[in-house]
Image (cartoon, helix red, strand yellow):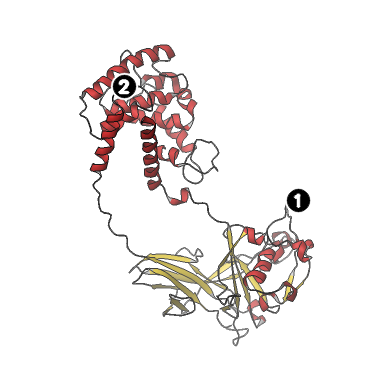
Amino acid sequence: MRTTKKILSMILAFVMVLGLLPATAFATESQYVYISVSFDGQYIDDKSGSPLVYVPVSFEQIESINLEEYNLGDYLYDPDGDGNYETTALQLIIYAHENIYGGSWSDVNFTGGAGGSYFQGGIFGFDENLNYFLNGQFPIDEALSENSSYAVGATSDHIVLEAGDFIDIASFTSYAFLWDSAAGFHLFADENDGFVHNYTAQVGEAVPVKLLRSYSNMVDGSPVLAEESGYELFYGAAFGTADGTLTTDDSGCASVTFDQAGTYYLWCDGNYGIDADTENIVSSPAYATITVAAPEAPRQPQDVSTVLNATMAKMAETVTEPAFGTTAGEWTVFGLARGGYYAKDNAYFTDYYNRIVETVNTEAASVNMNGALHKNKSTESSRLIVALSAISKDATSVGNWDLVEAYSANGFDWIKKQGLNGTIWALIALDSNNYATTDTTIRQQCVDAILAAQHTDGGWSLTANKDTTSDPDITGMA
C-alpha cells in the first residue's frame, strides 16, 4: 500500500512538472536543410505537381547520395583533412533532382572539377543559366577568394551544409541575372531584416511582412539587402491561388490580417530587369507561410478540492504514524500540513514531532557533524527541515540540535556531496522558513552552483554534462 501511494505521488509530481516546462525542453529537433528551385521567377513543380519550394530534406536523405557511386569521387570534400568528408550542397542537389523533382542524373551535364564544378545543363531541366544562394546570400569560397581581387563563389561541392540551412536555386532565360541592377534573390524578413519563412499571428492581428532582395558585393562577397518598395505580394489559403494582394511601401513593408485561424501562404514572383535586359526576369521569387492561431480562451479555474481531500485522506489512512524517512515520513507530513488536512496542533503532527526529536538526538550524535543527520547526504537534513517548517516547528531547535547550523558548520562541500540534488534542496530548506545562516555565503554558493549546472536546453539533470538532455525531475526542483 505504501509503495503504491509513493508511486502515484511520484507520477502526479512528474505530470505537474511536465505541464510547467516548455515543450522544447523535451523535443528533439529534426536535422533538416531546405531547398527551393525556380525558373524565371516562378517555382518549378516537383514530380507530384507541387511547387518545389522550401522542401525539407533530412541529412539522412542527403547523405544517402554517395558521390563515388555517381563517379564523382573527386568532388568529395574534406577541407580539414581529417578523413571525414563533409555533407555538401552537391549531394543535396543530386538528391532533390532525382527524388523530389523526379529527374535522372544521366540527363545532367556536370563539368569542371573539385571547387570549380559546373552544371552545364539538365539539372532540374535547366540549361546552364543557374545561380544559387545559401541562407540568403552568395556562398563564398574563402580559400579561393584569399588570392583573388574579387569574391570567388563556392561551387556546390564546396558548400558545407548545416542543420537549418536553406538554399535557393534559380535559373533564368537571360544571362542578365548576373549583372542587372534588379537581379538577386527575394526573401521575406522580420522587422530586423532577419530572413523568415514563417510569420505567426492571432486572428484579427495585423501581420507585418517585409520583402528584401539580396545580392552580393562582388568585391568581398558580402550580402547587400535592398528593400523592395512598390512590389506586389500575393497571399492565400492555397499556395499559388491568391485570395488577395499587398503592395509594399517605401521600406518594403506591408501588413495583412486574417479573420480565421489556419495556415496561409505569402509569395511574390521574380521581377524583370531594369537596365541590362528589361524583357526578361532577373530575380527569384519568395515564399513564406503565415500561421494564424485563434485567440486563447480564458482558462477557467477548476475545483480540485474533492480530489485533493480524497488523496490526503488516503495518505492519512495509509501512514498512521509518520516517522523520519522518505516513504512514510516527511513527504506525508508536508503534504497533509500544506494541504490543511490537519490543524498544526493535531496529535498527528505533535506525535510525529516527538518521534523526530528522538531520532535527531540519536542520529546527530552518531554522525557527530554539527547537527547533520548523515555524513554524505545533506538531503536527509533538508527534507526534515522542509517538513518541520510546514508544521510550524523551528528547525534551529530540535531536541538538542540546531539542524540549520549544519549547513554553515560543515560548509558547501558537505552540501554538494550529493551533487545538484543536495544543492537544490539545501536552498529550498533554508528558504522554507527564511532561516539565517552563520555563513552568509551559503545561499549564494547554492544559487551559483545551480545556475552553473544549467544545460544548453534550459533545464537540469543529475549529470554534469551540459549537452545531456534535461530531465523533468531535477528541472522541476531547480
Q: Quadrant of residue 174?
A: bottom right
Q: How many marks?
A: 2
Q: Residue at x 37, y 19 (%)?
A: 405
Closer to the camera in the image, 422 or 326: 326
- Left or right side of 125 for 452: left
**Element on which disc 1 rests:** loop
What amino acid is at disc 1? Gly
Q: Tell me what residue is drawn at x 46 percent, y 73 percent.
A: 266
For the C terminus, the quadrant is top left
The spot of residue 261 in percent (x, y) is: 37, 68
Establish if 420 lies above or below 406. below
Q: CA distance from mark 2 to mark 1?
A: 63 Å
Q: Is residue 19 above or below residue 220?
A: above
Count residues near mark 2 (Cα–Cα under 10 Å), then give few for <14, some for 14-19, many for 20+: many
Q: Which residue is mark 1?
A: 83
Q: Which residue is mark 2?
A: 395
**Residue 397 seen in render:** no
Image coordinates of residue 228 in percent, x first then y, are: 50, 75
Secondary structure, mark 2, is loop
Q: Which kind of residue does numbered mark 2 sit on?
A: Ala
Asked whether the viewer can see residue 308, the reply is yes
Q: Nearer the viewer, residue 443 or 309?
A: 309
Q: Is residue 359 left or right of residue 172?
A: left
**Residue that appears at 27% across and 30% down:** 317
Residue nearer the viewer, 404 or 22: 22
Earlier in the chain: of badge 2 and badge 1, it is 1
Which corner quadrant of the image does residue 147 belong to? bottom right
Q: Residues within 10 Å of mark 1 (few under 14, many from 20)?
A: few
Mark drawn on residue 202:
none
